[in-house]
Amino acid sequence: MPEKTQQALNRAIMEAVDFIHAEGWDAPPTLFGLVPSEYLPDHVDDSGDAPLTLVVQDCPPGLAPGSAELADYLSRIAWPPQVAGVILAQEIRFRDTSEGAEAAPRPARLFSGVLRSGEELTLVQRRPSEEELAAAGSFAQDEVELRGGDSVAPEVILALRYGLEQDPEAFDV
């Protein structure tokens, strides 16, 4: 099994960012299982030497980001041991405190990921306003600005980690 490090998680999250960005805004939450690339015999070689491969999971329709239904869904997942980690991408409302205490919440994407080996990462991508897009020019939609920090969305990290800690045999499937 490949070494599962923070670098591997960082790379997997960036692949998730690229995937979600290509899908566009106003999308439902997307859940990815992270599988060691060596487990996939027909692994596509365009990912280079990525130690982890994203596997998009089918989620029930109608799960709203940050909803009790999404939390309930995540609480019922028990990932098999072959899954090295998990990433959840969801659209949220984000208040950037660096813009001042009166800053209004704005649409953003939240990318949260964990590995069984303990690594975790959460990044936020703010949705550009119409004014920002107009000022930036014709390729502004192609730009992705990510922010992160300590203690960003700790509840999401705990929910994802919970699924990795459960025994799949204990669940009725």
Image: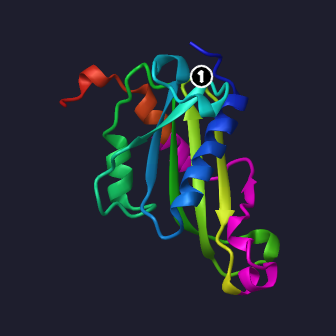
Secondary structure beneath label 1: loop
Residue 148 at what x, y percent from top left?
73, 52
Classify the position of the C terminus by image quarter.
top left
Residue at the image position 61 percent from the left and 51 percent from the top: 17
Viewer-nearest residue: 30 or 24: 24
Q: Position of residue 129 (x, y in %)?
A: 68, 81
Q: Is residue 139 magenta?
A: yes
102 in the magenta segment = no
Report the coloring of the rendering: rainbow
Q: Is residue 134 above or below residue 92?
A: below
Q: Is residue 126 above or below residue 102?
A: above
- At x 39%, y 64%, the residue is 64
The percent coordinates of residue 2 (x first, y second) are 61, 16
Most foreground residue, 139 or 78: 139
* Label 1 Cα crowd, 10 Å radius (few <14 / some 14-19 / many 20+): few
Residue beneath the point at 74% across and 56% down: 147
Q: Is residue 102 visible?
A: no
Residue reaching furthest to the top: 1
**Which of the image's four quarters has the N terminus?**
top right
Q: Specify whether 146 is left or right of 67.
A: right
Name the side, left or right, on which 39 lies relative to 9. left
For residue 67, above or below residue 153: below
Q: Which residue is mark 1?
A: 117
The disc labelled 1 sits on which kind of residue?
A: Ser
Q: Position of residue 92 (x, y in %)?
A: 54, 66
Q: Is residue 161 above or below residue 68?
A: above
Residue range of the region highlighted in magenta in the rendering = 131-159
Residue at 61% of width from left, 27% of height from top?
118
Count of picture labels:
1
Q: Is residue 29 visible?
A: yes
Q: On the image, which quarter does residue 48 sit in?
A: top right
As rendered, which of 148 and 68 lies closer to the eye?
Answer: 148
